[in-house]
Every structure is written in structure tokens, then in C-alpha cells.
Image (cartoon, coloured by chain):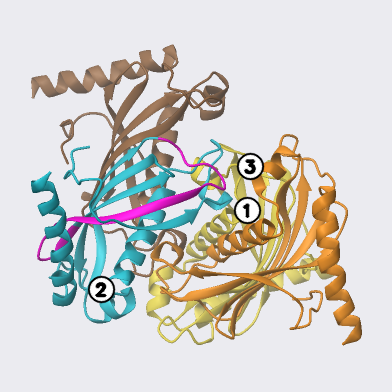
Chain colours: A brown, B orange, C yellow, D cyan
């Protein structure tokens, strides 16, 4: 997966999620599509952590939709695992953002994804610019990541 | 499960559905909540078969929501099973309907459900009467079932 | 829904869960089948809280499967709601247990369920008795609930 | 998304799938992760069409797991849409295969995916070679696609 390289030290928001029967399949492991739900939960909590909750954002005219996704499934999560799901902005545009996300079990990488999201108007589903406060807030994080990279 | 008794001979609409990995869990069988998705598919195709599709019905002011459900899980469906999922109206009110639904693998009963649905306004989510053409159409089927019962 | 009455004061285990896009449907509310996933999470955490985790229990020969379920959907949960999901044992048999579960948004009841679970052997899927330590532990809770009822 | 180019004329297996409430979210469209379930269904039916059903393959020591996935979401599917979901092998290795998959509504492309699958032993989850009959069968299709490309 070609993706923007991010230093291990760069700040990434993460939450812990438990794997329940609903998340698994008859192969005895987590069903691959269900990692996308885990990624959605981590992105939502990351935005909340930054002060942006979905319903007010939708009211203000911005709903995020996934446009592109690159996924790499390295090792399967198992029933009852407690996994660490992260979200870290790596690219920012006027109307879109790319987030690097990982599922880990302790230090072990299970799944990695690069998720490109566009901001659309909830009614028309047409692309629109990110709300200014969110763009300003994200710009700082993305700049920080880039600067750390340059210094690396 | 106490439910309106329906004679085996009463007409029931049914569709065949395949069990995929997405429908199963790490117990090696179909995940119990996913039968509810199968039931939704059968109800939707049954309404379509009667001439009532969901988007025009919603436009006309009626969206069905599940109010009560009684479920009995008899035997599990397995990966790659082709199951038969039925829907049969058994009770009809002005603003609600009760549907008997079954999942079978050939003659073998796997899951049985009694599903009580209310018609609500899609915007307000408030209860509203069923569209007249649908009520008229369903009345015939429910009456047929009752009459068959009385004669039994 | 006819269910064993439980006094409001009886001890119920509960967890808080967030409603994400994955849990909702085009009706703008939580999809009805997804409450069953929330119930599973609450039951699993309740058992963990009692000291019983699923993988060791499965190793010891007991996997819980849902046999019967009665559901009452009172009010819909909405996107981004934080709901309170409880689990409380109300009936205990040698090889089965009935759990009363509720989804609440603050004091408001959204969904209520009576869930009957059987303990089965993970390999044969045949019914088997509950592990003694779990049965002993649950007996206490169920007795407590009954006694409170009698005194009421 | 960089992917092996496949001529429009190359043979692709496809099935028609309906979008139900269970597949949608509060944004009013199909939830992005649920396209992965649709892709799984198309791949499974494509293999069945070639004469390879999952349970016998698992018995013979091969279970497919998704290793990499590149997804491009172009336009959303809506409730009650009937979509066309295709699967076409584009790269074949000894122990893996890459399948190009599309979701279309009539001629309109909704989602496109490149799915890399590995054959693993169902018990050890370790990579293993594809069963010879399947490899031989797929080789023919992949060769056909490549030849058509060269002639283009």
C-alpha cells in the first residue's frame, strides 16, 4: 500500500475496542468488512476529541463520506480481543482529508488503512469545503506530522 | 412463543437466501441478529410482490418500523446454506400489521418470528394509518388465513 | 411482552455504547437488528464483570446461544446517541438462563428484551449444563432479585 | 486507484443484489462497509459458478482471506436499488489471486475494488497454495483477460 509515511512518534488518536461475536465470522476471526466499522468509530471519536460532533457538523452542512480506501490485512483479530484503533490525519485539502488508521493488538499491527474522506452537503450529497474551524484545527496536526517527517 | 396459529396450508410468500461469511460468527453458525436482516429482505420482497415498493410508500407517508418481535431459534443455519425465508400476514390493524416469518432449510425449521410492524410518517416517526390500497390488499390475505383456520 | 417482573431497584449491570453510522439505517434511526449486537456486548461485559470470559468458557465446553428473544422497540436511538445497555439475570436453569436487557437514553426506555440463552458444547452445539462456578454465581443474583420481588 | 486495466469486453461474472434498510445508514445511502459484503457474495457465487463451493474447499484445506483491498466509492447506492456486482480475476499467483470487482446501477459505476485474496489453511490460518483444479480453471480466465489486453 503506497501511503504517506508517518513517523512512529507522530501523535495519533486511538480508542480501545472489543471484538464480539457480531464482529467475527465462521472462519473464527474478525470479518474483514467489520474493521471498517471499527475505523468509523475511531474517526468519529477523534473528531469528537477535537471538538467536532457529527450531528452539529451535518446541521452546518458537512457530512463526511468515504471516497477511497486502501486496506492491508496483516493478522486477524480474534473473538474477545481488545484492539487499539487509531486515526491520524496525513493529508488535508479544502474539501477532503486523508486519515491513516491502524488496528493493533498491543504492539502487533493487525490492519492498516488509508482513508480518503470528502465533505459533502447532507442534502445534495455534493462536495463542499470543510467547516473553517475544523480545517484550521486539522491543518495544525497535519503540519506537525509533515514537519516531524522532514526532520526525520 | 404465543402466536396466532396459522395452518400449514395458508399462503406464505418466501424467498431463498444464501448464508455468506458476513452472516456467520466465530461459533461457526449464522449470527443470531443476522436472521433479522433476512426477515427484512423477505418482508420487502413480499410487499414488492404485492405491488408496494418502499420508496414510493415512504413518499406517500408510510414507513414501516418494527415495534415488537418474538423470536425462536430452533436450529442454526450454516455457512453456504441456502435457506427459505417466508413472510405471512396474520393480524392487521389500521396502523399496524403482524407478520409470521420463518427460516427453513428444506423442510427443517431453523428460526421462527412474529414481527409486529407499525406504519409511521417518515419525517415525524409518528404512527399513521396504512395506505388504503395496501390495507385493502392485506385484508384479503389475513381474512383468507382466518377463514382457513375456522374451517380447520 | 409478558416477562418476569423485576423491581426497579434490582441490581442490573450496564455499559454505555455510542450509536455510529454503521448502526443506523436510511430511516435516520438505529437499525432494529443492531440493538441485538448492543445486547450481546452488554451480556459479554456483564459476564466478564462476573469473572467469566468467553474464550476460557468455550474451552471449558460452554458457549452461549440465543434460543428465544422477545423484543419491544419503544423509541428509536439516533446517530451519535450515547445509550445505556443493561443485562440482568431473571431466570436460571441448569442449562439455560434468561436475561432482561434494556437500552435507555438517560431515563428514557428505547428497547427492552427478554433473552433466553442456552449453554451448548462449542463443537457439537448440543445443550449442556452451565459451568458450576457460573451457575453458583448467577444463582445468588437471581435469588436476590426474587427476594426483592417477594418483599415488594 | 492503480489497478490492472481490464478491457470492458473481458468476461466478468456478476450477480444482482438489492439494497435493503440493513445495508443503508442515516446518511440515506448504502453504508460504505456494506459494499464489502456485496463483494463477498459476488466472489462466492462466481466461485460456485466455476464449480467451487466454500465448504468443500475448506475441507480440502483452502479458505480465502482478504489481504489487501483498494476501494473507490464513486456514487452511492440508495435504498431499494437493484445493483449489479461483478467479480473478475486479474492476477493469479500460486497462493493468491486478485479480483477486480464493481458495483453498478445499470451502466453507472458506483464502487470499484481491487481485492487481493490469499488461500490459507482453515485451521492454522497459514498461507497455502490454491487447489490445483481451481488454479487451472482460473489460469484460463486470467490468460484470456491478458490476451485481450495485449490485442487492445
In the drawing, what numbered circle is on residue D122?
2
Residue under disc 2 on the same chain as residue under disc 3:
no
Give the CA separation, mark 3 to mark 1: 11 Å
Answer whether residue C152 is visible to the viewer in this image. no
**Picture residue at 40% right of the left edge, 55% below the top:** D37
* Residue A75 picture quarter: bottom left
**Picture residue at 81% right of the left edge, 59% below the top:** B137
Q: Which residue is mark 1?
A: C32
Which mark is in front, 2 or 3?
A: 3
Is residue B149 found inside the magenta-colored segment of the image?
no
Give the CA separation, mark 2 to mark 3: 39 Å
Q: What chain letter is assigned to the residue under label 2?
A: D
- Tag 1: Cα neighbours inside 10 Å, few (<14), some, or many (≥20)? many
In the picture, measured across the screen, residue D116 lies left or right of residue D86, that is left
Q: Position of residue B11 (x, y in %)?
A: 74, 75
Q: Which residue is mark 3?
A: C27
**Picture residue at 35% right of the left edge, 23% below the top:** A96
**What segment is highlighted magenta in the picture?**
D75-97
Up the image or down, B122 lies above or below A125; here it is below
In the picture, measured across the screen, residue A93 lies left or right of residue A34, that is left
Q: Are marks 2 and 1 in contact (CB under 8 Å)?
A: no
Up the image or down, B111 lies above or below A30; here it is below
Q: Secondary structure at mark 1?
A: loop
Amino acid at each position: 500500500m503506497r501511503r504517506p509515511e508517518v513517523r512512529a512518534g507522530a501523535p495519533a488518536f486511538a480508542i480501545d475496542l472489543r471484538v464480539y461475536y457480531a464482529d467475527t465470522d465462521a472462519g473464527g476471526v474478525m470479518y474483514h468488512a467489520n474493521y471498517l466499522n471499527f475505523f468509523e468509530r475511531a474517526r468519529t471519536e477523534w473528531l469528537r476529541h477535537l471538538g467536532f460532533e457529527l450531528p452539529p457538523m451535518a446541521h452546518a452542512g458537512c457530512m463526511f463520506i468515504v471516497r477511497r480506501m486502501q486496506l492491508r490485512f496483516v493478522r486477524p483479530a480474534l473473538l474477545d480481543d481488545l484492539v487499539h484503533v487509531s486515526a491520524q490525519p496525513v493529508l488535508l485539502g479544502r474539501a477532503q482529508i486523508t486519515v491513516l488508521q491502524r488496528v493493533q493488538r498491543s504492539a502487533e499491527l493487525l490492519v492498516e488503512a488509508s482513508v480518503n474522506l470528502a465533505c459533502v452537503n447532507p442534502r445534495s450529497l455534493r462536495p463542499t469545503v470543510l467547516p473553517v474551524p475544523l480545517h484550521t484545527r486539522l491543518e495544525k496536526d497535519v503540519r506537525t506530522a509533515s514537519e516531524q517527517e522532514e526532520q526525520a
